[in-house]
Amino acid sequence: MIIISEVSSKSELKQFVKFPFQLYKNNKYWVPPIIKDEMDSFDKTINPVFEHADARFFLAYQNNKIVGRVAAIINWTEVNEQKVKKMRFGWFDMIDDIEVSKALLQKVNEIGKENNLKFIEGPVGFSNMDKVGILTKGYKELSTMITWYNYSYYKDHVEQLGYKKSQNFIETYFYFKDVGITKYKRYAEIVKKRYELKPLNFSSTKEIMPYVEEMFALFNTSYEKLPSFIPVSNNQIEYFKNKFISFINPEYIKFIIDKNGKLITFAITMPSFAKAFQKANGKLFPTGFLHILKAKKHSKDVVFFLIGVLPEYQKKGVTAIVFDEFFKTYKEKGILKTFSTPELEENKDIQLIWKNFKPIVYKKRSTYKKEID
């Protein structure tokens, strides 16, 4: 018998966060989150996303043992302002028993029905800044700190339960040595001169902070036409500023401004922390932070986290300036390989950015959708 129980205490929430540590124990491809970060992201007093979103967390038990989990999420900005009657589910993990998956998703369905929503989609987080999708290709590839990993049976379970693929994502990588640096340098100079643009490079986090609000405003503008995009609020900007910006090497953040000092492009990359997070195993102390600091200084792989270009400058070659600046930094740091975050398969603009880098598609993932019954 499977029992679904709603999380009602901090200790139960910690069990919710720690369930994958049991499920993926000794799995060399799974990258564990930092437990405290996960707990904080679910805390309504810390994460400002709860100003416009609700979430309920559920654990599945079988023979008094936890065998699955799911978060049932409603983003009210999406529902009320964008008129998308979506019931979200995320943080979806379970043993290889379709009855567990069925019971968890049925609970999500019930909540959607209670709130007069039309369909369920997931796995997704609270917003576009969260992890997304069930992995459908790349089970024997190392995950990253900004993606969910899962076993192949996850896909089988949801498909057998009548869920259909909704949004498809790809992840790629390319080798730094395969990039024609000279060509980009020449093109970057032409674009800078033509549009009177200037790159900004940073050596400290303090130098970046005055631009963060403008950067997220640009993020909202450049991504607003993508399906399911939800703008980042002012309070969320402050939250992400403290959570992420200070965590990233300042030299791995590049901005482009116009002649009036207006931000027209930003790009954020970060060292690969995957192996460091595996060694930390969910804890910063006593030694986890040392592994992370080492990766921050010495990792030879980078993850291309986010890029935004003002619409009127898209397809005008300004990314050549961004890459020229990154190449200088990567050469100095001895970077060997660059990984992309999940990108919508239909987002041809972002794929055009990579086309000359000989990208290799090594992972695919999808969200799954079903009408509420």
Image (cartoon, grey):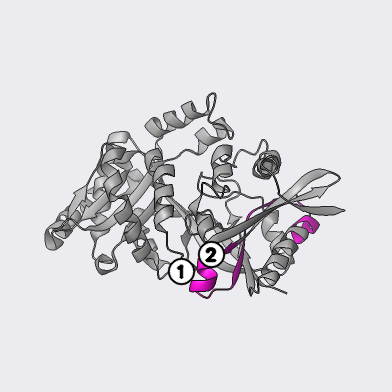
Image quarter (top left, top right, bottom left or bottom right) of the C terminus: bottom right
Query: Which residue range is magenta in the image?
Result: 74-102
Whole-percent x, y for residue 158 in the image: 70, 63
Q: Is residue 87 magenta?
A: yes
Q: Which residue is mark 1?
A: 346
Q: Residues within 10 Å of mark 2 (few under 14, many from 20)?
A: some
The reply to whether dot 2 and dot 1 touch (C-beta < 8 Å) is yes
- Which residue is at 87% across, 53% downward? 1
Q: Residue 295 at x, y = what percent?
A: 43, 32
Residue found 25% across the figure and 69% down from its top: 312
Task: Check if residue 284 falls in the magenta segment.
Answer: no
Position of residue 196 in the picture relative to residue 301 (left or right): left
Identify the residue shown where x is 50% and y is 56%. Answer: 49
**Residue 168: which disc?**
2
Indicate the amino acid at tag 1: Glu
* Disc on the earlier residue, 2 or 1: 2
**Residue 192 x/y as whole percent:** 15, 57
Cα–Cα span, label 2 and label 1: 8 Å
Q: Quadrant of residue 214?
A: bottom left
Q: Residue furthest top?
A: 286
- Left or right of 30, for residue 340: left
Q: Is residue 311 above or below residue 280?
A: below
The kind of residue on which mark 2 rests is Asn
Viewer-proximal residue among 292 and 30: 292
Say above or below: 52 vs 19: below
Locate residue 110, reporting x and y percent: 73, 67
- Residue under the point 39% across and 65% down: 223
**Left of 80 or right of it: where is 333?**
left
